[in-house]
Image (spheres, rainbow, N blue to C red):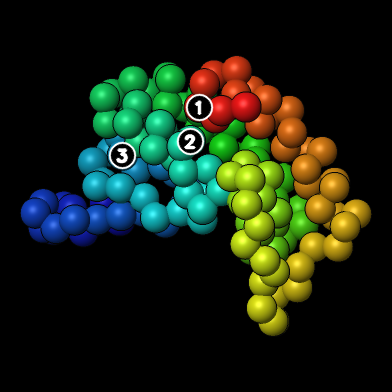
Amino acid sequence: SLDYKRLNPNIIVYNGSDMLITSAISTGLDGSVTAASNYLPELTVAIKKLASEKKIDEALRLQFILDEIVEASRIFGSLSSNYVLVKLFQGYDVGYPRGPIFPLDKEEEQQLINKVNQLKMKLIELKILKE
């Protein structure tokens, strides 16, 4: 992605990795298009804002929380997990994935929720999320 900026500094370049928001912004890219923005837009915006303001330590602290959530989702399949995480973090149901992606079963949903609930509480404590 940085090669595009090097070759044409006027081009707008976005990164697509949830786990590289801080890196992308702090190295001069223009933004990120991430799956996590579907379930935690408040967090991805906060990371971008801090990285843009060169508050890298603060941005990384939030980035690492997001990274833990992303890693937890990968255990069950990140695409299927996104549906559960939208409901958990945003409070509304977006339904189920269409085939060939299968939804998580109730046990998997609960395991995912259990893995990320402490991180949700941390985001509430940091005032990124509301109770």
Quick check: marks 3 and 1 in contact, CB under 8 Å?
no
The image quarter containing residue 51 is top left
Q: Residue at x 39, y 38 (%)?
A: 45
Q: CA distance from mark 3 to mark 1?
A: 19 Å
Question: Which quadrant, please, contains the C terminus?
Answer: top right
Closer to the camera in the image, 28 or 77: 77
**Label 2 environment density (alpha carbons within 10 Å; few <14, some 14–19, many ≥20):** many
Can residue 23 be seen here? no
Which SS class for mark 2?
Answer: helix
Compared across the picture, whether 125 is left or right of 74 comes to left
Quick check: marks 2 and 1 in contact, CB under 8 Å?
yes
Question: Which quadrant, please, contains the N terminus?
Answer: bottom left
Tag 2: amino acid: Leu
Q: Residue 25 — which label?
A: 3
Q: Which residue is mark 1?
A: 128
Can residue 96 be seen here? yes
Mark 3 and mark 1 lie on one chain; the one further toward the N terminus is 3
Tag 1: amino acid: Ile
76 over 99 or under it: above or below: above
Residue 52, horizontal then vertical, whole percent = 27, 31
Residue 89, horizontal then vertical, whole percent = 62, 42
Q: Residue 43 — which label?
A: 2
Tag 3: amino acid: Ile
Mark 2 and mark 1 lie on one chain; the one further toward the N terminus is 2
Q: Residue 84 — which label?
A: none
Q: Residue at x 62, y 52 (%)?
A: 92
Compared across the picture, whether 127 is left or right of 50 comes to right
